[in-house]
Structures are given as C-alpha cells and as structure tokens.
Amino acid sequence: MKALRIGLPSGRGARLFFTQSLLLFHLAFFCVSYAQQDETKRNGIAASSDHGELGGEPDSIMARCSMEDTCCGTTDPKPREGEEGPRDYIVTFKSYRNISEHLHSVHQLFGDCKSWRNLVRDNPAASLPTDFLVLRTLKSLDLHNFLRALEAHPNVKSLTKERQIDRSLFAVEDPPILRKMMNSDSGDDEGHASEKNHQRHILAKGLISITKFTNADVLWKKGHTGKGIRVAVFDTGIRDKHSSFRNVKERTDWTDEETLDDHIGHGTFVAGLIASTHSQCSGFAQDAEVYAFRVFNRKQVSYTSWFLDAFNYAILKDIDVLNLSIGGPDFLDRPFVEKVWEMSANGIIVVSAIGNDGPRYGTLNNPADQLDVIGVGGITYDDSLAVFSSRGMTTWEIPRGYGRVKPDIVAYGKGIRGPTTTGGCRSLSGTSVASPVVAGMVALLAGIADKRHLNPAMMKQILAASANPVPGHHIFEQGMGKVDLLKAAEMVEDYIPRASTIPGRLDLTDCPYMWPYCKQPIYYSAMPVIVNLTVLNPLSVSGTIENSRLELNPDGYAGKDPLISIEFSHSDVLWPWSGYLAISITVTPAGRLMSGAVSGQIVFDVVSETGVSETGEMATVISTVSIPLKINVSPPPPREKRLLWDQFHSLRYPSGYFPRDNLAIKSDILDWNGDHIHTNFRDTYNHLREEGYFIEVLGTDWTCVDATQYAAVLLVDPEEAYFDSEIEKLASDVYTRGLSLLVVAEWHNVEKMKKLKFLDQNTQSWWLPQTGGANLPQLNRVLEPFHMAFSDRILDGTVAVGSEIARYESGTSIFKFPKGGHLFSVHAQDAVSGTSRYFPIMGIYSTGSDAGNGRVALYGDSNCLDGNHRRGPPCYNILRALLAFVTRNETDPTIFPDALVLKSPFLSDFGNLPKQMEGTHFARYSRVLGENKLAECPILNTSYMPTVNHSEKPVPHLPAPGGGFYSNAQQGLPFFLVGLFAGACALALYIRCCRALEPLGWTIDVPFLTTSGNESTADGSEVTSKLNGNIDTEKSTRWSQSGKLHKRSSNNQAQKEIFKV
C-alpha cells in the first residue's frame, strides 16, 4: 500500500492558514478529478474542464487526448546543426493543468493540428500537471496570426521561442602545467609557514579535501552532516551505484537520451563536492539526500523546456537546495527566469555559478545574477580573486539605472578535488566548482537551521553577513567576500528573522572595496549617484517597503539645511523573498561648498504578513532596516574637468543581436557587457580619474542635460537612435553653449552584417545584426550639423602616438570633415575590399573662437579603450590628446601639425556612407524608435528594473508560497473565496479522495496545523510548525546592521482581516 502525505514543504516561509486549507482543497479536488478522468478514459466518454464543455461527441479532443498519449504530438528530434527546420514555441499558461487541458485551449483557437504539433516531453513529469506546452509550428502555418491568437488567449501567460540553453558548464580540468605546479612544494623563505599556509600547500597537492580546509569537519563532529536535507544537482547526471555517494535518492533524465548515467563527469564532480564520502575528495553534506537531474546530454546541449519540466519536478519533490553550475548571458529568457523565481517562492534555495568570463567586467551570468539566487564567484587558495571569475555589475538595470552587486559571495574554485565517474578523484577549476562548494555548505547549514526560518533570503543573509572581504578587490568582484562556514553556522544557531540588504553598509569612502563610488566624490549639480541595494526579506515570501527615509548625522547639515538629499525607488513587492531599493544621491545647494565626509543612515521598513494570529487575523510584522551611510562631498570641479558619459544611447544583448565590436574575436559574437564606464570601460574610467577628470553617467536622453555644466560629452560605441530634438539641442549646445563633443565610433557595414547573419539553432530563426559595432547611420545624423560623417569601411592597422603603439581593430574611417579641421591618417587594410592604403581615422574641429563655441573630436575605434575586447595596449595617449583639445582647446602639434589643417572640406573618394540594413527589427529594441517619446525631466527614475513579467506588479500570477502546482494567483479572488469554505469541505473531500484512490492502492496521511503552532501527525506526535509567524522579538541579534522587529498593533487600520466567523 502506497502512502501519500499531504502537507506544506518543510523550511518554507510564512504559511497562511487559509493557504493550507486551500492547498488541501486543491489536492483533494485533483485526486477526485484524476480518478474521474481515469474512469472517463476507460469508458471513452468526453471529459470536461473548467473552461466549459467540449461538446458531447465521443471523439472530442479531450477523449482522444490524455496525459499519456501523443494526440497532435510529435517526437521528432530537433534539427541538426546548421539545418533549418520547424520552430518550437513555449506557451506558458496561468495555471497548472494536465497537458490535455492545455491542448484543449489551443484547439479552441485553431480547431485542428494540421499545421502545428505538441512536442511530446518524455520525462518523469510527463503525467503531472504542468504550466506550459512546447508547440512545433510547421511551414504551412500562418505563423503571425497563430502567435497573435495564442498571445491573446485569456489562459496564456506568455509566448516565447524554445531555446537551446546557451549556459556553459563552468568547470575545466586543470592543465598539466598547473597540476605540476600544484604538486610542487613552494617552501617558505624563512623556513616556516603558518598552519593555514601549510594547509594551502597540502590542499594544492591534493592531500587534503576542500571540506577539511574550510573546517566542515568541525561541524561533522557536532553531528551536522546534512541529514534530511534534499539537494538537487542540475547537471549531467550521476553514475548508478557510485561508490562515493551513500544517499543518492533519485536520478532522473530530462534530455533526449535514454540514459541516467553521467557520460561527461561534470555532474558527478559537482554532486561530489556537495555529498561525496570519498576520503580524498569528500563533500560537505554527506548525509544529504541527493537528487540528480540530468538536464544536459552527451553533447552538453539542453533546452529551456527540459529545465522547466525539471524545475517543476523539483518543486513537487520539495527540494531544499538546488545547485546550478551553469549560466548564460540571457537574463530575458522569460520562462527560465520566472521558473527560478517560482522555485524560490516555494522555498528552494538556488545556488548558481556567476560565470567564467573573467577577468572581464559586466560578464555576470544568469540565473546567478537574479535577486533571489545566491550567485557565487571563485577565489584561489591564496584568497585572491580567480582570474576566470566573472565580474559585475549586473546589466539588467542600465542604461536608465545602475547595476546591483553580484556575485553575492565568493568561494574556493581553483584546483578543487572532486570524484570521478570511476570512483577516483580529480581536480577542476571554475565557478561551477565554487558553486557546489557553497551549495554543500548551504545543505550543511540547512540541517542546523530552525526549519520555520529556512528560506532563500535567510540563507543568503547568513552567508553575506558572515563573509570576509577579500583584500584588494572591490565589491563588484567579490560581493560580500569569502564565505566563512563556521561563522555562518554560529549565526544559523542564533538566527532571528529580520530584513536586511546587500550590501549592509554604504561607506562610499572605503577604497578599493567600494569602487567605483570611492573613486570620485559627489558634488552639487552632478548627475545623481545611484546605489542599487538588494533587499532580503526572510520574514515572508512577499512583503513591501515603506517609509524610506534618510537620517543624517550632525555632519550632514549646514545649520538646519541638509547637505545631501536622497530619492528612493524600490520593488512594488518584495517577491520572492527579495527585491531592490535604489537610492539616488545628490548634493543640495547647502552643500555647494562642502568638502569632507557626510554620514547618516538610510532607514526603511519591510512589512510582511507572516501568518494567522490567535484571533484569526493576519499577523503583520514590521522589520526596520538601518543602513549606515558615509560619502565624500566636494565642491563642484571646474567645467573643463567635467565629462558626461552617454549611456542612454548604448544597446546590447539581450535580447537583440548586437554584434561584437572587435570582429577578430571569434569566440564571442555578441555585445553583452553593457558598454558602461564601470564595466568593460572601467580601465578607461580609472585612467580618466587619474588624469583629474570627473565622469558622470547620463541615463536619459540629451534634452534633460544642462550643457553649461560640462566640458564635453563622450559618445562611445553608441548603438541607439536619436530623437530629432536631441540632435538639435546637442548642436545648439556645441555651437552656442561651449559644450564639446568626443565621439569614438566602430564599424558598420551592411555587407559584413549580412555575413554575420546566422541560423539560431535553438529558435530555428535567422538572426540579423541590428547594427554594426556602432550605429553609424544614426551617429552620422548627430554629426551632420558639423558637416562630419564616418564611412562604411572596416579597418585594421596600428596607430603610433609618441611611444604608444595601439592596435586599430575593426574600426572605421572618416568619410566627411569640414574645412579648418585637422585629420590624422594611418596606413590600414580595409577588411571589406582588401585594399591597403592611408585612411583618415581621427579628426578635431573647432566651431569658432568665441567662448560659446565648442569643439568636436572623432576617433574611429573604441576597442583600444574597451578593457574586455582590447588585444593590445590602450590608446590613452590618443585619448589624452583628444580630451585636451575638447576640454581646454589644446592641440598636440606632434599629432595635429598645422600642415594637416584642411584648406577645403574633405570628402573621401573611397567607401560610402553607411546605411541601415533592411530586414532588421531595430525598432523592437530601441528606446527611441520603440517608445517614440522623450523621457521626463529631471531624472527621477533612479533604478530601472526591466521586469520579464510585463505586468505592473510582479505578483499577480505568483504561485502560493507552499504550493505552486495547483494554484493560480491570476485567479486569486475565486480561489480566495474557495478558501473561505475550504475547511468545511476538506473532510468530505478527504473521504471521497480516499475512496477514489483506494482502487489504485493509495492511502492518505494528512497532518493538520494546530493553533499552538505545531503539527499533529497521524500517530499523535508533534513536529515543529512550518508557519513562520512565531517570532521571538525580544532576543538580541548578532547582525552588524541594526534592525528592529515589532508586531503591528491589533487596532491598526492597515491590519488585514482574513477570517470572520
């Protein structure tokens, strides 16, 4: 006799009484429905759904389509590499239902399946309720109308193309030379070494495991081994009956191959770092229950739908910790991102590798860059940041806002030993090694934690607060620092739920840790300085931010006037367990002459509903968060030192195809690093600061700018279009307000763009570049008032200025330039025609001699300033000379001698003006052409967080905190009303459900919640309640960040009343 236990998953967030009843009602209803459907199939009678009767014909679609069959289905494989075939679309619905019911929704629209097929998913979740279909569209289909009809269907939540997961497995085997170095002693010069250094040498030689080095054995001796914790490893699988694992609970395959074994070794290695029992490469939580999800096949290929099914199954299996040693740049893969949110909402702690794209900046990978996920970077044995570890900031928010801190923490990921498929040990490096190191620690800590408090926010909060900053590295490289297992264990034992932020303190004077904030003071009239905080709310899966305010210390006032002001923007709802709080800092008129540090606190309340009180009303808890703030303020610098970096006119992947700037780099075809002065141009930022310049970032269009404050605006590698009013104002500012313009361009050639067209194998659609490296047709519109233009040539060569020899790679040439300007030419090869000759690549021009006349400087290649794509020395001598001209009207005679002054306008006799390529969808990705309206001024939107939900608030369709499979928050009102009488119906449905399942060999064991906060099991014993509402507010906290908890009084008008009997 099989036993089905009904109850909320352990370790989840706030559980409401009506939610428990509602879940019981839904599950009982499903049991009855399942039995009825089974009887219907046996009798050949048409079934019905809540969408209405389908007609009484015996051969109706619901009679022909069941959970097991392949009605309108296909099992044809994906097209081979380079082969064009049908397109697959993921149709996500607003509720979980059987596949046959979802198919009925499609049939209601189209009547038959002659031009489309349901892609059959043969995996362990095939017979379970699901929230999506994968539809294959055939060539005979009117695709446009088909997709429009689906998107308009009331039951459809979203429609996206099925994607081949471009999420690399982030681990590489150490090369022989490294293994040789690791096995050689590097003795101390003085003949002795500290115990820790001695352990590092032993660890590097493979004689000690990572668990010993991080003191996991201390917790083992206390009896903490991860027992009872369910850990899911999404990877390449684990071999059957592997000798290094004692508790592999289940192995499942979600790929197109019929095997459960690991044919690559990556999954075995990753799982081993979590739970291996091998003495030479042991895992952290050896008694944890391991669930191996094989989501990559032998070719290391996966698809979004494979992950979605596996994620749903993980929710059903009540997984506690889930490791994803994978990642990719596409944070707009909507179904994937939303499903990760849903797992977090169901209490699953997701740990993910931040990526192996270091030392480049702006290279964070998804899902590690999500608010709710613990993103892990890598360090070496000597506590230095690993070269391969991806660096921040997040790029979701730019250009209008500023990125968040990621990774969250770092852990050892260089030369770590783990098990092989054959039972031995080997050494691997990468952030996918660091990620399971943290996941293993999390499993160990989860076994210690009070299950009432265990949730993703609580665990991230513990790891962040206990981490130790790595000296010499800044916050966007390491997050909160190196994870400290023993310190984290102490915090877990004394844990009291409270809201907090990452980072927990804002000392913007702390260098280098708080780079770039510490690199430049703030001053009056400057663009706002934006800090984007991650808010963690372990009190409830959802909450709100209220009463955000700045409380200044005495040094923050001039008399009674504050020296700085702050504007706030934040998530409408903190879900799941987290959100953002962006603060925009400006100096007030009272601080115009201030020079020194200003301090204070940023304070806000997190309001959460945590359960049902004894009176049957909602228990609302307020957690007050106080963040120490310290920032340097200075008087405004002279105008000639102030530069404005135009971020608004930068576009990047995702989601459009914007190609790389340097065509010589074949390994990375997409421009996805943000093109921000603090990401791939960070080296240039540091250089400009060392030169004494002050750089501000423009996140909106040019019409919002007071040009009289700046010496020059920098247009570097722009891809965006321009409003006509922007072009007019910019020209006016240059001709009459003394503003100068420095433009650094890139290639744009239609013939080359056509050659970069490729068949995207995962979406079965042709990808066309939306622009070249830069959008020269649009940029030439900006330059037209100055009688300048770039050409469509693609040049490669070298540029020598003084002792500096910089490479000129995939740059362009100047096509048109006005009389009186200087042009600088170099010998280069045109990649389009193959011709080698001299091309003008740099020019300077003054619009006049009056004080109100500005200057314009052009340069045709940004790669020498881009730290991520530069393959030679930077072109700082060139930059220095161009800035001297545009800011101070100083001309370097060694670069621009008088002999180079144009006696007449220049017009190139080689090449053409660049054109926009036909057939692109540029307007789809453009903020200018797409919105076709100017932004409001002044800048008040301090953190633009593009939601992939495409809804006003991120919660209308969220799953219930403890369920997910049978809930639909879009239908919240009907389900809420059902919940009111669910208690009365529960007993009758329970009895009927039992009777319905008896023929199938099932019995039901239902634990009901008691009002004392405990659960009574069937045998009369009591276990700890899974409700998170019983909070000890008198116990002191161990956190460095001050906080207050208090219950909202019962007579508060804001208190919600749920039950009235």
Image (tube, grey):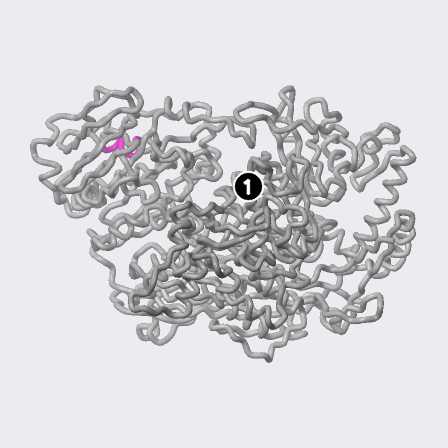
Question: Would residue 583 be seen by someone viewing this image from the given angle?
Answer: yes
Left/right of residue 24 with respect to residue 948 in the rendered view:
right
- For mark 1, give the secondary structure: loop
Range shown magenta: 780-786
Q: Where is residue 851 in the image (x, y as percent from the top left)?
A: 15, 46
599 sits left or right of 82 in the view: left
**x 82%, y 33%: residue:** 62
State yes or no: residue 781 in magenta.
Answer: yes
Position of the C terminus by quadrant: bottom right
Q: Name the residue under label 1.
A: 333
Q: Please name the amino acid that badge 1 sits on.
A: Asp
Residue 658: percent from the left, percent from the top? Answer: 42, 34
Which of 525/881 is in front? 881
Residue at 42% x, 71% y: name it. 551
For the residue pair 3 and 215, the one nearer the viewer reads as 215
Q: Is residue 571 left or right of residue 847?
A: right
Taking the view exactly as shown, the residue that stands out farthest to the left is: 899
| Residue 775 in sight here | no
In the rendered image, the vertical position of residue 674 relative to residue 861, given as above or below: below
Residue 969 shown left or right of residue 1022 in the figure: left
Q: Nearer the viewer, residue 209 or 322?
A: 209
Classify residue 5 by image quadrant: bottom right
**Residue 684 among magenta residues:** no
Quadrant in which residue 747 is drawn = top left
Percent x, y of residue 284: 57, 61
Q: Residue at x 49, y 59 (%)?
A: 534
Q: x and y percent of residue 578 in the render?
A: 55, 58
